[in-house]
Amino acid sequence: MRPDKPRDPVVGPDAGPENPYPVRLSGPVIKGFGRGSKDLGIPTANIPADDLSEKHPELTSGVYYGVVALDPQNLAHENGAEKSTSATLLPAVLSIGYNPFYKNTVRSVEIHIMPPLTQPSPTAVAQPKFNRLPDFYGTQLNLLILGYIRPEYDYVSLEALIEDIRIDCEVARQSLLREAYQRYIVDDGKASAQVTEDRKWLATFEGVNAKN
Ligand SMILES: Cc1cc2nc3c(=O)[nH]c(=O)nc-3n(C[C@H](O)[C@H](O)[C@H](O)COP(=O)(O)O)c2cc1C
Ligand SMILES: Nc1ncnc2c1ncn2[C@@H]1O[C@H](COP(=O)(O)OP(=O)(O)O)[C@@H](O)[C@H]1O
Ligand SMILES: [Mg+2]
């Protein structure tokens, strides 16, 4: 059960991600249990978790923050829009694990994509409106995990789970707003070769050239 104590507003070192982060994950967006939007009003893009324990033993179950990119070609196709050649990098908060509130028997990786950091946060208020995009099932998703937020918990109610995820969004946002983290989204001219490489990896999909 969630401990009854206040949450830290920012997590991870100010100087930037520390070993083992950043961690790269990618995969096609698959169907989950259909609860994210319906039960919680919080859509989560699920990606396969089959070989996660083997490939990433460092990713213990819990809540993390990071940056995502969606394959723009596939996305444009799904939405009937004109094909784009560059991927947009967006802040994200995610859960890896068994969702103790729902007692899942299989592990899942579920990513909630937030609005750009330049826009006001829709979750900074008590009655939040979680970010919603047009559906993008089947689209390739690249994710760079930059830090760990907390373990997964069981909750006394659905409302308590939603409120904690709202706080996760704010913690992720405040943590990503730091210079050493924003650099993974926007080139400020001060990024190391490694950060530049990670940002390039994020925006690279088969047949799509990376921006910058
Ligand atoms: C940031 C974030 C934190 C979460 N934390 C928890 C948690 O502590 N306990 C839990 O049972 N589920 C947690 N969840 C998972 C939700 O219960 C899950 O997104 C929901 O069951 C939707 O599942 P679905 O994609 O299979 O429909 C979290 C989800 C997100 C995006
Ligand atoms: N902000 C968002 N973050 C993640 N997925 C989103 C977002 N907005 C819309 N979606 C879409 O909603 C779907 C997830 O909804 P959800 O209710 O969690 O269903 P599922 O149980 O199938 O994962 C994603 O696969 C994606 O297509
Ligand atoms: Mg989901």
Image (cartoon, rainbow, N blue to C red):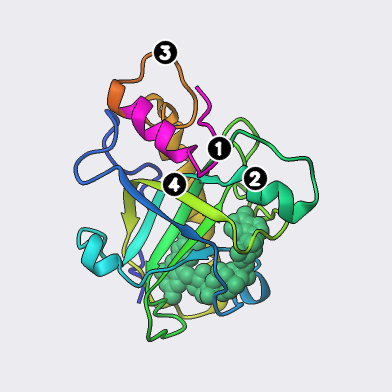
> Which disc, if any, is residue 208?
1
Q: Are marks 3 and 4 in contact (CB under 8 Å)?
A: no
Tell me: 49 left or right of 29.
left
Q: Residue 179: x percent and y percent?
A: 40, 24
Whether residue 107 is situated above or below residue 112 in the rendered picture:
below
Camera-nearest label, 3 or 4: 3
Residue at disc 1, CB closer than 8 Å to ligand 2 = no
Q: Secondary structure at mark 2?
A: helix
Q: At 63% across and 76% down in the image, what residue appears?
A: 39
Q: At 38% across and 59% down in the image, what residue appears?
A: 63
Distance between the alpha carbons at the discs numbered 3 and 2: 28 Å
Tell me: 192 left or right of 144.
left
Q: At 68% across and 37% down in the image, what residue appears?
A: 84
Q: Nearer the viewer, residue 85 or 63?
A: 85
Q: Which image quarter is the N terminus in?
A: bottom left
Camera-nearest label, 1 or 4: 1
Q: Are marks 2 and 1 in contact (CB under 8 Å)?
A: yes
Tell me the magenta residue range: 195-212
Camera-nearest label, 3 or 2: 2
Tell me: 19 left or right of 71.
left
